[in-house]
Amino acid sequence: MMQLEVFDILWKAYSLQNPSVQAIHDLFTKENEQVINDHIAFRTFDDARMNIKVLSKKFIKLGYIPKGDYVFEDKHLNAIHLEHPTIENAPRVFISELILSEFSAEFRKTVKKRINSVGNAYYADPDLIYKGSVWGKPSYADYQFLRKESEYAAWLYIHGFRANHFTVSINALKKYNSIEKVNQFIKDSGYEMNTTGGEIKGVPEKLLQQSSTLAEIIQMEFEEGTYEVPACFYEFAIRYPDTNGELFSGFIAANANKIFDSTNFR
Ligand code: OOG
Ligand code: NI
């Protein structure tokens, strides 16, 4: 289906780790809906070995072009999104990075210790985007410590480089042609939604509305034993035309700020 193999590879890892996303995908296809991905997203640290620039490379090689820049001051993140200029329905790619200099010394030390635990060759691999956590078995104490300053950092520490969500394009659905209908369908099917700031992020006037499931809870092995942690989530997005009649193609920081919370520990 997808013309770019990279998304098949990312989908495999994502759906294998998070069976609920495959189940939700299949719910739509059973309703004869076509599941088109509006976008996918990655997270990283702003360390020069693995920052946005490094993760973008794979997509730039495939012809993607950086489009939007975003800043999330309260979450201490920068982000960009990339689009493919010619391949129809190629998903947008959203990449954010945590600004390490804005955190406490102890926090930075904890992150750097892990980052430095593997050689630079790990990060130089063009397949870094598929590698997940390259830092070996995580420490549950460090995971909980990082959470105090950043849920994002804690998630990234244990999950690493992977698509943290795919996004169903509501524009491509026939029967479920509004975000309200999609949300109802997802909830009726037994899945929990992210309700930070309300179930629906954004308003039609701002040309993008989004919602997401709460990240799937999975068992993960830590140095201290096995614990339950949030993994990945599924998002739903509907885009509206601007005054020129063109569908809005960017992201809305105020929406995104709430979508990040889908992976908070619970
Ligand atoms: C990205 C959150 C932002 C969107 O569509 O605005 C986002 C993340 O959780 O890493 O996906
Ligand atoms: Ni998203």
Image: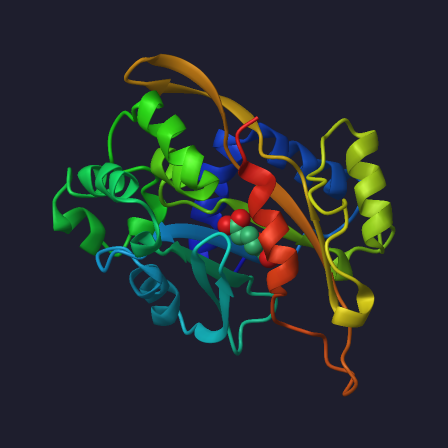
Tell me the quarter of the image containing the C terminus: top right
Q: Is residue 251 above or below residue 2?
A: below
Q: Position of residue 14 (x, y in %)?
A: 49, 39
Pick the front one: 95 or 1: 95
Quarter of the figure with residue 144? top left
Pick the front one: 91 or 212: 212
Residue drawn at x 30%, y 23% is 139
Q: Residue furthest top?
A: 225
Q: Is residue 147 left or right of residue 88?
A: left
Q: Residue furthest front?
A: 104
Residue drawn at x 31%, y 57% is 46
Q: Is residue 9 visible?
A: yes
Pick the front one: 120 or 34: 120
Q: Is residue 159 left or right of residue 195?
A: left
Q: Is residue 133 above or below residue 98?
A: above
Q: Position of residue 239 (x, y in %)?
A: 73, 66
Way the structure is coloured = rainbow
Numbered marks: total: 0
Q: Position of residue 50 (x, y in %)?
A: 27, 55
Q: Is residue 1 visible?
A: no
Quarter of the figure with residue 48? bottom left
Q: Residue furthest bottom?
A: 244
Tell me the quarter of the image containing the N terminus: bottom right
Q: Is residue 44 above or below residue 233?
A: below
Residue drawn at x 28%, y 17% is 223
Q: Is residue 248 left or right of residue 188?
A: left
Q: Position of residue 53 (x, y in %)?
A: 32, 66
